[in-house]
Amino acid sequence: MASSRAPAVRVAPGRAPLPQPGPAPSPRATKNKLSEDSDAPPPKRSHIFYGSLEEKERERIAKGESGLLGRERVKAAIEAGNINITSGEVFDLEDHISERQAEVLAEFERRKRARQINVSTDDSEVKACLRALGEPITLFGEGPAERRERLRNILSVVGTDALEKTKKDDEKSKKSKEEYQQTWYHEGPNSLKTARLWIANYSLPRATKRLEEARLYKEIPEATRTSQKQELHKSLRSLNNFCSQIGDDRPISYCHFSPNSKLLATACWSGLCKLWSVPDCSLVHTLRGHNTNVGAIVFHPQATVSLDKKDINLASCAADGSVKLWNLESDEPVADIEGHTMRVARVMWHPSGRFLGTTCYDHSWRLWDLQAQEEILHQEGHSKGVYDIAFHIDGSLAGTGGMDAFGRVWDLRTGRCIMFLEGHLKEIYGINFSPNGYHIATGSGDNTCKVWDLRQRKCVYTIPAHQNLVTGVKFEPTHGNFLLTGAYDNTAKIWTHPGWSPLKTLAGHEGKVMGLDISSDGQLIATCSYDRTFKLWMAESL
């Protein structure tokens, strides 16, 4: 038989005996125990003080209860901001309430003023008022009614006088801009007055002669004039390159025919100027005097015709601001014109041969009286450098083209700017007057050539001339029957006048066309290029 004893439990040495499972307490015993616990008194809790302990802390610190260590701890806690002991500052609740009441009253007053403000029901006027006040004219999802209400609220804050004040300020700014844009004059020397009178006396007879020739030409039958134009166009279409010459070791920047069409002057980046015979293109003279890039060289209007070789026959300019005068006998300059401190881009003779015009990168152009041997006019007016200059065939006007993309026409007899050439998008590199007296051509870096009418004072035609910037423009010097343009697309082109249709493209250069000219008899065309060559073009029938 098995024994009824419980098995013995051995306890390892050093370990406590496991608790023996006993009989489970009955529910009645548990209930009695809970009732005994509920009869016990509740534990005593510490008091919670509400409010500031500042006074008690001050008393405790004054009595020195906490000792030296406690004082140091309190001071450290005060410095750390954990204990806030003020210096007697208080927050006045009544003042705060009065400020709030004032804000509410001000808001009621603003709404009252807003109801009394009359705002236009025209939405465009409301937008204009908002723009004048510097506010956005419309907000996202805002309609005309909300816009009117927003304007009314803004006016209730800033006051209705603010709108009138902004209008007055706008009027003042407009007046100041108009005054700034007005042309102003300063007193010039007596030599300038003498020169202006001389130019007037010189130009008026030439203008009379030109108008008389125009009347005579108009009397020619229309059929005869049309046949002459057709023959001219036919000969221009047959233009070919009959002479090409290497002019220098560096690019050739400018070329100009002599008045008798038997010499061609070229300007080079090497600093040399050369004279070539026409049409065989053999070297005649090498003019040495410039030390840097030569911008232009031009013949005197009477050179090789009535002027002596010992007199001044040519003028040239360079990038260092030097302007030199030459004769046809010496290889050295006979005179220097001093006064420019920046690059001189172009130089041009007045038709009388007495005056010389120069354009400079100091935003001005100058007129020199070679008879009086002095500068008589230093004219400003461009906002950037002035690149090219041309004189009217009568000698009364001068045209300038600048790097600011604007051209100006100046009356040399009065000093006024009589026409502002506005329309090009980039710099103007060439300007020229037509022999008819009223057409002006300008070539620009925007690849176009514009034709302007002095009578209408506006641009009458824009020629989409080239695929790169236009470096020069030139009318046929006798009657202005055609227009020649050259550009950085390595070509020069001929256009009819006044139809402005293309007649011929002179292609042959391997580099940019940098200069061009037409002989005084209209039979020869010269072009010079970045490829260091110049070419002569002539019609096959000639």
Image: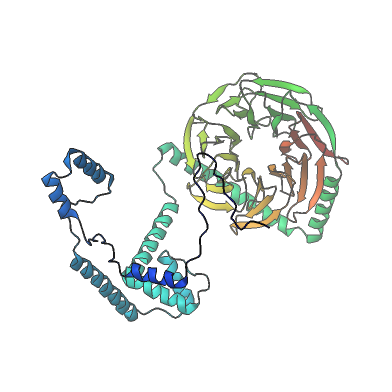
- Name, please, the residue furthest toward the right: 541
Quadrant holding the N terminus: bottom right
Above or below: residue 258 compared with residue 415: above
Above or below: residue 270 compared with residue 73: above
Quadrant holding the C terminus: top right
- x then y, percent, for residue 113: 30, 77
Residue 446 visible in the snapshot? yes
Q: Nearer the viewer, residue 491 or 195?
A: 491
- x then y, percent, for residue 533: 77, 29
- x then y, percent, for residue 276: 75, 26
- 484 vs 51, left or right, is right
- Name, please, the residue furthest toward the front: 1
User: Based on the displayed image, in which of its 4 quarters is residue 393 positioned?
Assistant: top right
- 104 vs 331, left or right, is left
Q: Nearer the viewer, residue 8 or 281?
A: 8
- 230 vs 83, left or right, is right
Above or below: residue 215 compared with residue 314: below
- x then y, percent, for residue 126: 44, 74
